[in-house]
Image (cartoon, coloured by chain):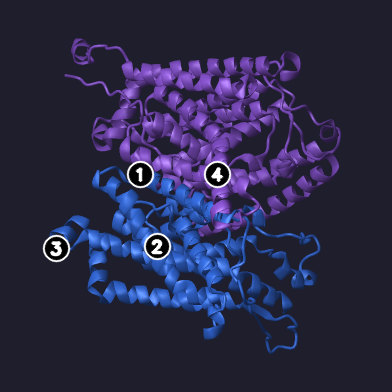
Amino acid sequence: MTTSKTTDRTAPRRLPLRELILFGALFVAILGVYAVMGPAYSTRMLVEAACYAIIALGLTIQWGYAGQFNAGVMGFVALGGFCAMFFGIPVNEAFWDSQLPGELGRVLLYLVGAVLLVWGATKLDRLGVPKRLRTIIAVVLAVVLYLVVISLLREVTGEIRSQAGFIGGLGLPSWIGWIAGGALAGFIGYYIGHICLGLRSDYLAIATLGIAEIIKAFLKNSDWLTRGTATVSPLPWPTPGPSDLGFVLARAVYLSLTAVVIAGIFFLLHRAYHAPWGRMIRAIRDNEVSSAAMGKDINKRRLEIFVFGCILMGIGGAALTNFNSIFDPQGYLPLNHTFLVLVMVILGGPGNNLGTIFGAVLVYIIWIMSEPLALFLMNIAVYIGEGWFGWEPPSNISSRALQARVFVIGLLISLVLRYAPRGLMPEKVPHHH
Amino acid sequence: MNELVFFINNVVVAGSVTGSIYAMGAIGVTLVFSIMRFAHFAHADMMTLGAFVVLLLSLAFPGAGSVVGLPTAIVMLPIAMVVTAAVAVGIDKAFYKPLRSHGVKPIVIVIGSLGVTLMLQGLLRLFAGTSPQNMYVAERKEIYRLELPFEAVTRPVIVTEPQVILFILVVAAVVGLHLFLNKTRTGKAMRAMSDNPDLARASGINTNHIVSVTWIIVGGLATMAGTLLSMDVTFKPDLSFFLLLPIFAAAIVGGVGHPYGAIAGGFVVGFAETLAVFNWAVLLRPFQERLPDWLELPNNLAFVGTEYKIVVPFFILVAILVWRPTGIFKGKVI
């Protein structure tokens, strides 16, 4: 122990000048937004930025701590949002009073039975069945049972849709939904990570990109569960709503709730980062082979950190959806919920929690403010085009101006990777002498 | 027998069309992967970009097609391929080369390619709008109805003009690529670099030149695939995330780094998609009388609904990652 004490001595503490300047500038920017846009709008922006900060912390431990690139943040955010909706909204009596819950339960039991049967079929070789025959039996059984269960499920869900609309919520306090959102996202993340983490990181990016689109497609098309494109609103807040306190105060209370959540996560992450566990994660990121040689279980640690990241994304997504008070599966977009978070992390400093929170707030301000700015620039362009060249602008100019933000986010990613690959607040790697 | 025709129209024709498109896309992805060793996420947007260039050119010269007797878009395709290839080389010089020369991890270049994806998407949506547009500017899409010479068949097999052109061009592209990779000096150098970049460099191959050639081929193929897809349906600027997954699945199924594997993978994924959304009850209905009474056919016997089409490439991807990460043709393990 004594040797580790002496070698652990880090560089002498100095005034964190860079952090102070950056946060000072951020504070000035926030004050500027308050002065221009008014307190209600600005507080809303801050709450959303705080929710994004939770999501970004999830990505920073995946990408910054462990070097795993998750390109499907949107999917985990949507799962969190779904849980916030499902647990929070009131119970749908029309559904629970009818025969339908029993029918749905019966189909779900069939599903469990089918899964068990197929699982049993894959173990047939223990009974002496040749392996090839076992595989054929298992696949055929899986296909047939799948078709049976899915057609039963289609019947029941169709009934639910026509008789009760959708199955409604559980009517619990919505903070339970936040926790459940984190748990569900972590659960899905476990299976994704289980398959993809052993391979090169490109596969993880491809697979997560796909799973995000699948989750969105599922939530969008399962009208019986989520009302799909009809959207569910309002979602009750865990804090007193605007009708009790007025917009500014209610949003401020919500903001303090998210701030408490962030503070808790930040504290835990800080402890984990400086603990032996955090050192091990960084060692695996920086040199896989040597940490494997040290006897570290690389795949298990990677899976751990991937699941942790997904849990944070689920919680953040639940908080974000809950705040917007509407669950709209179509509102989850790769740009808003994956790439925006990615920019926050790589601009702020991957692996640096403080930097990530800074990046989240800064990028979100830029993102929100770019909307009026893009319209303004577009109007100037139209004015010049019309006045000087007699150009006939297309009618949907405002919706096109918003597309410019896609370009800006892409440009930001490219510029940061090129000129500040470690972000504005780089991860501080302790140097041992 | 009409059910069989229905099957041909909805599975054989549609599957070959999607399969050809995916195959062309997957060849591009796999070429980038074998030469530069990163998953190029901007590929689907390069396809859209190529199609957009074709659309612009056809809008500028709507009468060009009737002179030759082909759709205008096909006449404009070679020009657009040159333009897109130039853009692809430019993108590489501006965004990927600096990262490569810094010696970053491949995953960082993947993120860089995501940045390029978003920039391309932003520009495309800015200039093309978000609504779908028809690639046939001046003429009409020809539809061929092939009547089958059987008594019981009353419905025709339907093939459209862009589909016929697609099949011809796919075969031409594959044969051309095969000859290029096996017969020419540059093609052999490309294969050498894909096998072992250090050894290739040591034996005097100009790797920068090879990288440029790769991007030219990739840009050209992407334009072809994007244009033919847009001609078959419509031009949509925001298609890319739905194309990416099947294309990558096809490349991985075929074995990353194998152009021929990518073709096979493209058809596997394309047919799997169409077979999965096909309603099998249609084929079984004629046999309803012979089936036992307790077995009543439901109306819809598709594996997944059309809205869940994207699940199919994902499951193929997962299955291949679990059982055979090298792909069918033993590609590189990544």
Q: In percent of the image, x 41 and y 74: which residue is there?
A: B173
Q: Earlier in the sequence, mark 1 or mark 2?
A: 2
> Which residue is the site of mark 4?
A380
> Which residue is the site of mark 3?
B204
Location of residue A24 by image quarter: top left
Check the image and report above or below for A318 versus A330. Answer: above
Of all residues, the one furthest to the top in this rendering is: A2
Hey, what amino acid is under mark 4?
Ile
Q: CA distance from mark 3 to mark 1?
A: 28 Å
Q: In percent of the image, x 62 and y 46: which residue is there?
A: A399
Letter of the blue chain: B
Query: Which element is circle 1 on?
Result: helix
User: In the rendered image of this protein, which colour is used for chain A?
Assistant: purple
Q: Chain of mark 2?
A: B
Query: Which element is circle 4 on?
Result: helix
Residue A179 screen position, x and y as percent? 59, 24
Q: In percent of the image, x 69 and y 50: which residue is there?
A: A149
Residue B28 screen position, x and y as percent? 40, 62
> Which residue is the site of mark 1?
B107
Looking at the image, residue B38 sits to the left or right of residue B168; the answer is left
Hey, what amino acid is under mark 1?
Ile
Hey, what amino acid is under mark 2?
Gly
Dot 2 and dot 4 residues touching (CB under 8 Å): no
3 or 4: mark nearer the eye: 4
Hey, what amino acid is under mark 3?
Gly
The foreground one among B217 and B201 is B217
2 or 4: mark nearer the eye: 4
Label 4 crowd bin: few (<14), some (14–19), many (20+), radius 10 Å: few
Label 3 crowd bin: few (<14), some (14–19), many (20+), radius 10 Å: few
Q: CA distance from mark 3 to mark 4?
A: 54 Å
Looking at the image, residue A21 sits to the left or right of residue B241; the answer is left
4 or 1: mark nearer the eye: 4
